[in-house]
Image: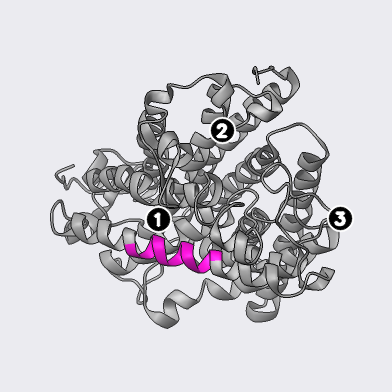
Amino acid sequence: MEFELDSGNTAWMITASSLVLLMTPGLAFFYGGMVRGKSVLNMMMMSFSSIGVAGLIWVLYGYSLTFGSDIGGIIGNPADFFGLAMTDDESLMAAVGVPATVAAAFQATFAIITVALISGAIADRVKFGTWLVFAALWVTLVYSPVAHMVWGGGLLGVDGPIATALSAPIDFAGGTVVHINAGVAGLVLALVIGKRKGFGTEAMRPHNLPFVMLGAALLWFGWFGFNAGSEFAADGTAGRAWLNTLVATGVAMLAWMATEKLRDGAPTTLGAASGVVAGLVAITPAAAAVDTFGSIAIGVVAGILCALAVGLKFKFGFDDSLDVVGVHLVGGLVGTVLLGFFATDNASYGVWYPEGALNGLFYGGGFTQLISQIVAALVAVIFSAVVTAIIAYALKFTLGWRISEEAEVSGIDLAVHGETAYENSGSTITEVR
């Protein structure tokens, strides 16, 4: 069939791609505000550099690894679309009239933000060069395979073995591909790299809460492209995803603040911003697969559980600096698993799930969809944990992860980047970059 351009869908997808790309600078503000003043530039650089590394890899072979012809249910053929050599007829979004270049651009922004999310788990203490190498390896060996398994025709997709035996696991916009994947990777890196000096014994408070609030606002704004754009068309399903993104996120913010009020005596701006992100994460896999009441329920559960989960690092002694595990891993698991309860064909699964997905337990579908969601989440957790650990240890014993203790104490900004965000926020120590 000859490709027919749909200018409306194409315009929407270019817009959605731009919105999702904005999320990475938004994340830089969110994470940058949460670290101490002597680390803010390095934290923001880790997000911005993800655009360069992941963007380059994506146009060379990342897109092909993800959406090329299936190899063993795990990966696509890297030679199929190397350098984005493809026609519009081969576009991922050809059925809705969106050209191949736009399809590749939209998916590139997902790879970029996923890598950037991981950086929050290892703030203040890692060599910038090692981070860049890790980003390149992780996009290649972890992100692309997981995205292929879920969206590219692999074993977690609508035609995979889980779909055949049970029903198609639902991940409308990235609960497993982005958030569970990044959350597990953040946990693994935190364990391999180790704690910051002073973790658990000295206060490491956010240095700029307005930055955190600004970052959360930019993330929320960009997330409408993230979720509504994942329909690949300007239609009612995109509208459903937009509304659910609004509602679940707002409810999660309220639930997080209520949890803080009951536990600590006061709702905080940091809690409100974190609740926003928790709600965005949890509704991502479910954006077009639940109705209004499902989105409210997901927001409530995510806001409460993520607010409680961020304290796990102190209980178990791992230094997840900026709560990647508590927000993204836990939030991604909440949204993915709750789909097994709240998925409904009264909403719309969108173009990814034209057939094969079932109603959740609370909508008369029995346990089938719930089991399917749990299995998909477990596969993503195991794959990401194992391959990330291999990459992390390989880099630990070659390039090394940690900056010197002296540089960490004085400030990573000055030591690694030769500059500071504010006057008197670092000493004159230099470090090999």
Residue toward you, 320 or 189: 189
Q: Quadrant of residue 345?
A: bottom right
**Pointer 3 or 2: first along the chain:** 2
SS type, badge 2: helix
Q: Quadrant of the C terminus?
A: top left
- The amino acid marked with disc number 1 is Arg
Horizontally, residue 380 falls left or right of residue 37, namely right
Query: Are circles 2 and 1 on residues that touch, CB within 8 Å?
Result: no
Closer to the camera: disc 3 or disc 2?
Answer: 3
Residue toward you, 264 or 396: 396
- Decide: is 176 above or below 75: below
Residue 70 placement (x, y as % from top left): 45, 44
Residue 304 placement (x, y as % from top left): 67, 72
Give the overall secondary structure of the magenta segment.
Answer: helix
The CA distance from mark 2 to mark 1 is 33 Å
SS type, badge 3: loop
Which portion, as a residue range, is magenta?
376-386
- The amino acid marked with disc number 3 is Asn
Residue 395 placement (x, y as % from top left): 20, 54
Q: Which residue is mark 2?
A: 106
Q: Residues within 10 Å of mark 2 (few under 14, many from 20)?
A: many
Q: Going 73% across and 44% down the picture, which residue do you hit?
A: 350
- The amino acid marked with disc number 2 is Phe
Q: Going 35% across and 42% down the picture, which residue do you hit?
A: 423
